[in-house]
C-alpha cells in the first residue's frame, strides 16, 4: 500500500498534476456540470450511450474520472490511480473518435474533427505521474508518511521480522 502512495518532494510531480488536473477538470466540468459550453451529465450520458453506443458504465466512469478524478489529482490524492484512469480514457477517446482525424488538432477548421495530439500529451503527463507520484504538497505523500516507509531490517540483529515499518 505504501508504494501506491509513495512520492518524492519534487516540483515536477506538483507541476504535472496541477496543470493536468486543471486542464482535465475543465473537460470534466463540461461533462458533469454543463460548464464551459458542455452538455452536463444527462446530455453527455445521452451522447455517449445513444450516439456513440458506449455502455452506460463506461460513459459514467469517463464523466466521473474527468471531473472528480481531476479534483483528486489537483489535491494529489490517488495520483497514480487517476493518472492510470486518464490513460485509459484518452486511449479510448483516440480509438473511438480521434484516430481517423489524424495527429493534429483542427487548428484551421479544415478537418472534420480533432486529431489526437492533445490525448497523447495527456497520456505522456499521466505516465510521468505514474512514475514519480504526486510530488510536493500531495495528499499521497502525506498518506505515505502516515503509513510509514518499509525498510529492510536484518532479523538476526533484532529478532523481529525481516521487514519493519518506520513511522514519523
Image (cartoon, rainbow, N blue to C red):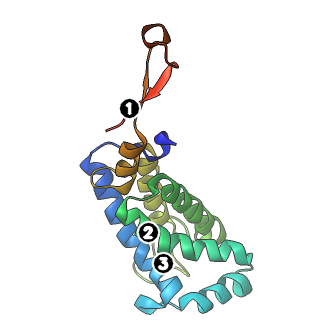
Image coords of residue 71 (percent x, y): 41, 70
Whole-number angstrom distance, CA of label 3 to CA of label 2? 8 Å
Earlier sequence position, callout 3 versus callout 2: 3
The kind of secondary structure element at disc 2 is: helix
Q: Which mark is residue 112?
A: none
Q: Secondary structure at mark 1?
A: loop
Q: Is residue 65 left or right of residue 49?
A: left
Of labels 2 and 1, the one closer to you: 1
Q: Position of residue 97 (x, y in %)?
A: 62, 73
Of badges 1 and 3, the one in the foreground is 1
Q: Residue at x 52, y 79 (%)?
A: 111
Residue at point 35%, 50% (across, down)? 142
Q: Which residue is mark 1?
A: 166
Q: Which residue is mark 3?
A: 28
Q: Residue at x 73, y 87 (%)?
A: 50
Q: From the viewer's perspective, is 119 left or right of 94? A: left
Label disc, if present, on residue 70 of the rendered structure: 2
Badge 3: how crowded within 10 Å, few (<14), some, or many (20+)?
Answer: many
Residue 29 against residue 142 in the figure, above or below: below
Q: Nearer the viewer, residue 161 or 131?
A: 161
Comes first in the chain, label 2 or label 1: 2
Q: Are marks 2 and 1 in contact (CB under 8 Å)?
A: no
Badge 2: how crowded within 10 Å, few (<14), some, or many (20+)? Answer: many
Q: Nearer the viewer, residue 44 or 61?
A: 61
Secondary structure found at label 3: helix
Does the residue at mark 3 contact the one at mark 2 (Cβ under 8 Å)?
yes
Query: Which of the two labelled residues, at mark 1 and mark 3, occupies the earlier sequence position?
Result: 3
Count of numbered circles in the view: 3
Pick out the residue farthest to the left.
11
Amino acid at each position: 500500500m505504501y508504494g501506491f502512495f509513495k512520492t518524492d518532494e519534487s516540483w515536477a510531480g506538483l507541476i504535472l498534476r496541477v496543470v493536468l488536473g486543471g486542464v482535465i477538470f475543465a473537460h470534466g466540468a463540461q461533462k458533469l456540470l454543463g460548464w464551459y459550453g458542455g452538455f452536463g451529465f444527462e446530455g453527455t450520458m445521452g451522447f455517449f450511450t445513444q450516439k456513440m453506443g458506449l455502455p452506460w458504465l463506461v460513459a459514467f466512469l469517463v464523466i466521473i474520472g474527468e471531473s472528480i478524478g481531476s479534483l483528486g489529482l489537483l489535491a494529489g490524492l490517488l495520483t497514480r490511480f487517476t493518472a492510470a484512469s486518464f490513460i485509459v480514457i484518452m486511449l479510448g477517446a483516440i480509438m473511438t473518435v480521434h484516430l481517423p482525424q489524424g495527429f493534429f488538432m483542427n487548428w484551421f477548421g479544415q478537418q472534420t474533427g480533432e486529431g489526437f495530439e492533445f490525448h497523447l500529451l495527456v497520456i505522456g503527463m499521466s505516465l510521468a505521474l505514474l512514475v514519480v507520484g504526486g510530488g510536493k504538497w500531495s495528499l499521497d505523500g502525506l498518506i505515505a508518511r502516515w503509513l510509514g516507509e518499509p525498510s529492510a531490517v536484518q532479523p538476526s540483529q533484532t529478532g523481529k521480522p525481516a521487514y519493519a515499518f518506520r513511522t514519523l
